[in-house]
């Protein structure tokens, strides 16, 4: 997997076990990064900008790492007691996913659960957008999201879904073990997932637009929940 950009580079550069090779632009002039790569014995290959532009879909800032694929956590590794876990119900946009990872890191959530099929996964764009936060957030990928929610409920979690038709998110009790579900960008939560929710949280709207970007809605509810725990 390729990851790119200076912020991501600074986050992972000291973990040489993750980096297989570094690709730098022939005009790359960040001496700190070059020195750190040499100090950690990471192989460097210099390329022209045209070649690097074809390698990734984004602003690489003259640096691309070839890294080992992300190793997902087991669901039990997210549970330690009095946890808040974010569950993404078939989110598709890697930019939304990366932004949610940043929010989760800033808020101190216990981890994120995503489904394996028909969903965004950890890729180079997610790494770039999360700006290194992924290194400090546990992401669990599960085969069956519905069964995983049932498992959390057996472990004592209350499940809070998100939808336009629900309870004002500020009036919900977020104490104890909580799982917050953020639905798909266009369809929201699936019917089966929605039926497993103990509460449905809604963000009151005053404008003419009746929905928020998934990452924005997630940020509002996550920080409300963490602030009242």
Image (tube, rainbow, N blue to C red):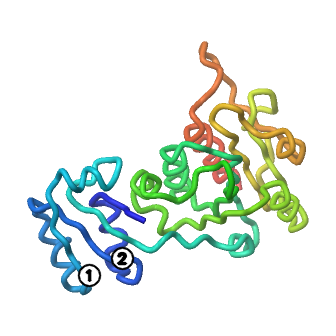
Q: Residue at x 48, y 45 (%)?
A: 95
Asked if the residue at tag 1 contacts the one at tag 2, i.e. Cβ–Cβ closer than 8 Å, the answer is: yes
x, y percentage for residue 207?
60, 15
- Could you tell which of marks 2 and 1 lies nearer the N-terminus? 2
Image quarter hosting the C terminus? bottom right
Classify 142 as above or below 74.
above
| Left or right of 196 in this view: 84 | left
Secondary structure of the residue carrying numbered label 1: loop
Measured Cα–Cα span from mark 2 to mark 1 = 7 Å
Nearest the camera: 96 or 23? 23
Nearest the camera: 191 or 227? 191
Question: Residue 70 bears which disc, if any?
Answer: none
Classify 150 as above or below 190.
below
x, y percentage for residue 178?
77, 56
x, y percentage for residue 107?
56, 56
Residue where numbered disc 1 is placed? 42
Question: Residue 19 bears which disc, if any?
Answer: 2
Q: Residue at x 54, y 43 (%)?
A: 93
Classify 192 as above or below 66.
above
Q: Residues within 10 Å of mark 1 (few under 14, many from 20)?
A: some
Residue 32 sits in quarter: bottom left
Image quarter hosting the N terminus? bottom left
Nearest the camera: 175 or 143? 143
Secondary structure of the residue carrying numbered label 2: strand
């Amino acid at each position: 997997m390729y990851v790119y950009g200076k912020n991501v580079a600074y986050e992972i550069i000291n973990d040489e076990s993750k980096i297989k090779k570094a690709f730098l632009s022939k005009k790359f002039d960040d001496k700190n990064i070059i020195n750190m790569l040499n100090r950690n014995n990471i192989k460097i290959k210099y390329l022209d900008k045209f070649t690097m532009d074809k390698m990734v879909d984004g602003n690489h800032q003259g640096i691309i790492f070839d890294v080992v694929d992300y190793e997902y956590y087991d669901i039990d590794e997210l549970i330690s007691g009095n946890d808040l876990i974010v569950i993404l119900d078939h989110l598709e946009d890697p930019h939304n996913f990366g932004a949610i990872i940043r929010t989760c890191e800033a808020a101190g959530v216990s981890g994120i659960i995503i489904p394996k099929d028909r969903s965004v996964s950890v890729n180079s764009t997610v790494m770039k957008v999360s700006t290194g936060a992924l290194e400090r957030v546990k992401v669990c990928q599960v085969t069956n999201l519905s069964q995983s929610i049932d498992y959390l409920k057996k472990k004592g979690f209350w499940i809070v879904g998100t939808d336009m038709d629900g309870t004002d998110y500020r009036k919900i009790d977020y104490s104890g073990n909580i799982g917050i579900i953020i639905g798909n960008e266009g369809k929201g939560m699936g019917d089966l997932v929605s039926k497993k929710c103990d509460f449905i949280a809604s963000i009151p709207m005053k404008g003419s637009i009746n929905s928020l970007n998934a990452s924005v809605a997630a940020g509002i509810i996550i920080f409300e929940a963490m602030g009242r725990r």
